[in-house]
Image (tube, grey):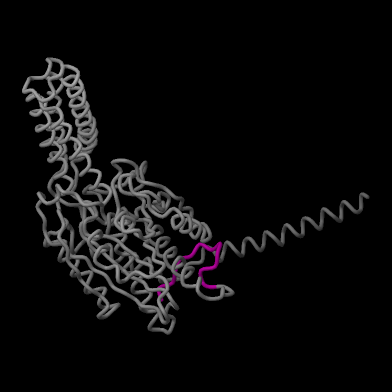
Amino acid sequence: MGKFSVFRDKLKDAVSRIRAGRKDGAEEEKIETPPIRLSDEAMAFIRDFTAEHPERRAASEDSKNAARRIFSLFREYAGDDAVITTCRIAPFRHKSMVIAAAVSSAIIFLLIIAGLPFAAIAVSVFYLSQLRNELTKKPNRLRKFFMTSEAYNVHAVAEPEGECRNTVILTAHHDSAEIRKKDSGVRRFASSLVSLVVSFSALSAISLISLILEIAGGRLFAFNFPSLPVAVLSVLFLVPSISAVFYLKSYTGKHSSGAGDNASGLAVISTLLHYYSKERSEGRPLSSTRLVFASFDGEECGTAGSLGWFSSNTHLLSSKSYVLNFDGLYREDDMVFLARDGNGLIPLSFPLASRCSRIASSMGYHIGVGKLGFLGGETDAASAAAMGIPAVTLTSMAPGTDTPAHSEDDTYDKISEEAIAEAISIAIKLVSEIDEEDRKPSSGSYLDSGKHYKLSKY
């Protein structure tokens, strides 16, 4: 028995050494890095693009020049399949909605003082319904009062070799955010939005209380002044006005260079377009999947540019269409696939987000599924979702992460090349999987599961 146990221990030790050797070999394969990588091209794009176009306010001439630069690059890779399209957007949409809230509050106050609480409630309901429509990408009647300008979107199309049965739309935006004032400006921005929401809600509640009191006293349609407590409380209309002023003063009037938000996403889709054009020229086109590469203006003002683009380009969709949006790629450790967007009000595709997360995991990356909360902002994937297209966003700007977005510190040096490399790798793997769905499974590919890839250039 003793001899057998000695033999058994030696056998276990030998097996352990063999397994360790295999594991070491796998690790060597995992960290092997070709000398030239796709991420190098993407990083060079971010550096050059932000240097050439340092400020890109939505629908401005600066943003249009950036769109022309993108179009020139897309045309180099896609020829006549690269297109510039235009749409009308409201560049100051967020500010306009805040000002409309302050004006509505003043009207509600005057109606309460005049003894017309039912009219005050009607104004409150109207504004809140239009705010909901604005946040959920539905028609907003207030928008006709907003100043509009022409915006440029750019896209390129790569058709498959055979019949198109799938469409993957890879998207980003090229406008940059207005810079908020440091420290006090950021606090002022957050506190003004919260106080605006709370005070407007309180004023609407006072309208309802006043209405109930008038009904109880039989004075509903008689011209009269409200009771003293109601009149005093309705002075809350001043709070939305003050909040609106604080909100407007939280900005500097300048726009960031937007290296992360969102030259990073733009670099990913332009590099992918170059990659797939090279694949096609070397005789390796996709079988049944159409690829669309789109860069939008107006993401920083309610994703207006992408909403206009998706509304006008339904002819590019197929029976199975997907949108993978890239926005704010800073650090790989902070990246998530968003399954809820539009200030938490618009659901994206949870199945697609889960699939992308699984693909990332199979490649050795750790990217989970997340969401944007209320007042957490929105991305262009929300526009696709509003049109009924399965969509997700890959971002490093999920709630709880600290990024230089919307500040003067949003510069090239804040971008991790690993984050860019992972985004490119995951996109290629997702497209490969989708294209393979209509064919027999292949025995393997350069994107086999379990390997942490640094993609070679071409």
Q: Is residue 415 left or right of residue 153?
A: right
From what the image shows, is residue 362 above or below residue 117?
below
Span colored in magenta: 445-458
Q: Position of residue 442 (x, y in %)?
A: 56, 75
From what the image shows, is residue 99 above or below residue 328?
above
Quadrant hosting residue 372: top left
Q: Is residue 395 left or right of residue 412?
A: right
Choose between 189 and 316: the one closer to the eye: 316
Choose between 32 and 428: the one closer to the eye: 428
Classified by dominant secondary structure, the portion drawn in magenta counts as: loop
Q: Is residue 241 left or right of residue 288?
A: left
Choose between 150 and 45: the one closer to the eye: 150
Is residue 252 a member of the stretch shown in magenta?
Answer: no
From what the image shows, is residue 300 above or below residue 224?
below
Quadrant, the C terminus = bottom left
Q: Position of residue 303 (x, y in %)?
A: 24, 55
The answer to whether residue 303 is seen in the rendering is yes
Quadrant hosting residue 238: top left
Taking the spot 29% from the left edge, 67% from the top edge, the residue there is 314
Q: Position of residue 212 (x, y in %)?
A: 21, 22
* Total residue callouts: 0
Taking the spot 9% from the left edge, 29% from the top edge, the residue there is 111
Is residue 453 a member of the stretch shown in magenta?
Answer: yes
> Which residue in the rendered view is the most extreme toward the top?
228
From what the image shows, is residue 101 above or below residue 452?
above
Q: Position of residue 310 (x, y in %)?
A: 27, 63
The answer to whether residue 238 is seen in the rendering is no
